[in-house]
Image (tube, rainbow, N blue to C red):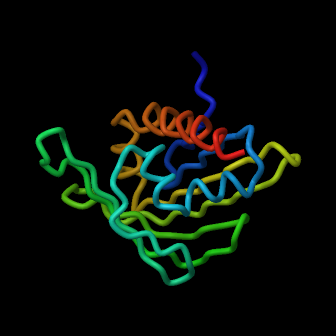
């Protein structure tokens, strides 16, 4: 099955450009990124903090069935323009990966469709390439598929 979420990684660059078109109005796509209860559903993680505003912060945590924390991530929201853009940092705690800078652009294509473009900047091309060795693209595509399903119920 073709992945709807496209990950573009140019050789030797320290960035990723990720795009995905959704059968959702842009306001619903944006809402799926800023409402903690919705984020938890499509990301499959617990939202500890999500201050959807400029200079806000966020923190997510995922535990295994026995309650052991297996993933923690956090960051700061630098720019927040409703239904248009979020600029934030992303740090995976307990990993060798340094903080990343993420530019999320939300674009209305029609009244009922929208596009998300994520521009992620890494400290080095090597760190970016290490992340791509993980099932990153597959996991992000699966998460975006869940986002589409969950947001469809909000229409």
User: Which residue is found at the position 19% from the left and 41% from the top?
Assistant: 64
Q: Give the image location of residue 70, x and y in percent.
A: 19, 47
Q: Quadrant of the N terminus?
A: top right
User: Which residue is found at the position 60% from the left and 49% from the top?
Assistant: 17
In this view, which residue lies farthest toward the bottom? 55
Q: Give the image location of residue 99, x and y in percent.
A: 36, 66
| Residue 90 occupies quadrant | bottom left
User: Which residue is found at the position 69% from the left and 53% from the top?
Assistant: 28
Front residue of 97/143: it is: 143
User: Which residue is found at the position 53% from the left and 73% from the top?
Assistant: 52
Front residue of 42/100: it is: 42
Q: Give the image location of residue 37, x and y in percent.
A: 47, 56
Front residue of 106/29: it is: 29
Residue 111 to residue 89: above or below: above
Q: Give the image location of residue 21, x and y in percent.
A: 71, 40
Q: Quadrant of the C terminus?
A: top right
Is 52 left, or right, of 89 in this rendering?
Answer: right
| Residue 27 occupies quadrant | bottom right
């Amino acid at each position: 099955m073709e992945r709807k979420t496209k990950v573009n990684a140019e050789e030797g660059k320290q960035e990723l450009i990720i795009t995905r078109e959704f059968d959702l109005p842009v306001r619903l796509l944006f809402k799926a990124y800023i409402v903690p209860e919705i984020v938890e559903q499509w990301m499959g993680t617990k939202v500890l903090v999500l201050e959807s505003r400029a200079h806000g912060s966020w923190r997510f945590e995922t535990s295994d069935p026995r309650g052991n924390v297996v993933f923690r991530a956090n960051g700061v929201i630098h720019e927040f323009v409703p239904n248009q853009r979020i600029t934030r940092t992303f740090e995976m705690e307990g990993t060798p990966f340094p903080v990343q800078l993420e530019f999320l652009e939300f674009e209305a294509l029609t009244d009922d469709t929208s596009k998300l473009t994520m521009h992620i900047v890494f400290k080095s091309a090597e760190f970016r390439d290490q992340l791509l060795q993980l099932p990153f693209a597959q996991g992000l595509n699966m998460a975006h598929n869940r986002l589409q399903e969950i947001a469809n119920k909000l229409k």
